[in-house]
Image (cartoon, helix red, strand yellow):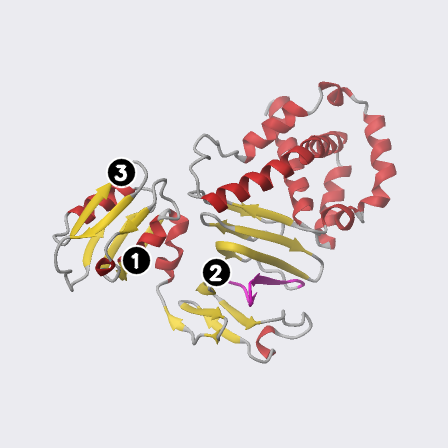
Amino acid sequence: MTNEHVREAILQQAGEWYAAHRAGLLSNTQRAEFLAWLKSSPQHIEEYFGVHAAASLLAGHVKAMDEYAAARVVEEGSGEIDNVVPLSRSDAMAAARAIIPRRRRLVSVAACLAFFALGVVAFAFRDVMLFGSGQTYRTVHGQQGSWRLPDGSVLHLNSESSVTVRMTDAERVLTVHQGQALFQVAHDSARRFRVAAGAANIVAIGTQFDVRRDAQSEQVTIIEGRVAVTKGDAPPIESPALDVPGAVSLGAGEQLEIHAEGVSAPRKVDPKQVSAWTKGQIIVEATPLSEIIVEFNRYAAVPLEIADPELRDLELSGVFDAYDVESFLEFMRRLDDVAVEATPTRIRFHHRAVATTAPAELTTQH
């Protein structure tokens, strides 16, 4: 491995450690691992503080732009993000390298060590001082994202979704502000994993589960493992999740909803169907067209509409590519009772005859 490759690898490690601190408090074990990594090489110190300097330089400009743009896109649902290019971790690292002044790379090892020695005492408190508000992850219309969190868990976000991650020595708390998220939970016996979504609190017991939040309700679906769901205040940390009054235990393949009236009884669902969005798919089984249209509109650049109320309850079954609207339209055009009107600004489905009672079927995968 060349010196340049070594430097790039260290820069990537520095970026990952910086991201871990931005996401919330590290455990004592993780903090010790970070300090050991930092002390093991002056180059580690140089790269870490270089990443920190670059991030600090950008933070003030990016925060205002990010919040304003996200709010505009979510509220207006416009297509103004067509020319926005997603930034990968490797792109971010390259940007960090480019933005760090060249002279920083020539700073002496002695100066770096002096900086480290002065800051090591304050470092134990930097998470509380700088990052107490946690890290928020967002996607805009038509975008999906996945992130590995500092504890090893993985967060998946569907289109137009937002989740804030906060980690302390006592628990890991993820707040779903809107949209849909799937959580792959890493085991940590010292810290529980809790998801707050509106009135719902979900405490994981080593699992993988999906949470979907809209204006009317919160929906929780278990892909594997088991969770405890409560409505209202978060259950006390010192109490086992299932011992909390009103807690509902959910296992793999079960789903419930929390709404203003209360908590629904658990029902059986197909986990593959619920989590299909993570593979860019929409899987439906005898599902009303009105619900399918809602799913496609989470990704479509041109909105889909049902022009005639008679079509709302038309049941369809199949596996669709969430981003391939044309294939779905071709399928709809083959139905005798449906006419498709497509314009540059909208796609409308009209009733052509008496609706069929048998579910139509199609599989379109890539």
In the displayed structure, would residue 158 be above or below residue 97?
A: below
Quickly name the residue at label 2.
Answer: 215
Q: Residue at x 55, y 63 (%)?
A: 198
Vertical relation: 38 (above or below) 338: above
Q: Name the spot of residue 136 as percent of width and height, x first.
A: 60, 48
Say whether residue 364 is visible.
no
Residue 45 located left or right of residue 110: left
Q: Position of residue 115 (x, y in %)?
A: 84, 33
Residue pictured at 60% horizontal, 52% vertical: 164
Residue closer to the observer: 19 or 179: 179
Q: Secondary structure at mark 2?
A: loop
Instruction: Give the residue drawn at x 67%, y 45%.
Output: 22
Hey, what amino acid is under mark 3? Thr
Q: Amino acid at mark 2?
A: Ala
The CA distance from mark 2 to mark 3 is 29 Å
Q: Nearer the viewer, mark 2 or mark 3?
A: 3
Q: CA distance from mark 2 to mark 1?
A: 17 Å
Image quadrant where one finds the C terminus: top left
Label 3 packing within 10 angstroms: few (<14), some (14-19), many (20+): few
The reply to whether callout 3 and callout 1 are in contact (CB within 8 Å) is: no
Q: Which mark is residue 343?
A: 3
Disc on res. 17: none
Residue at numbered disc 1:
290
Q: Determine whether the residue tagged by mark 1 lies in a helix, strand or loop.
A: helix
Mark 3 and mark 1 lie on one chain; the one further toward the N terminus is: 1
Q: Classify the position of the N terminus by image quarter.
A: top right
Residue type, numbered disc 1: Ser
Specify the segment rendered in magenta.
190-215
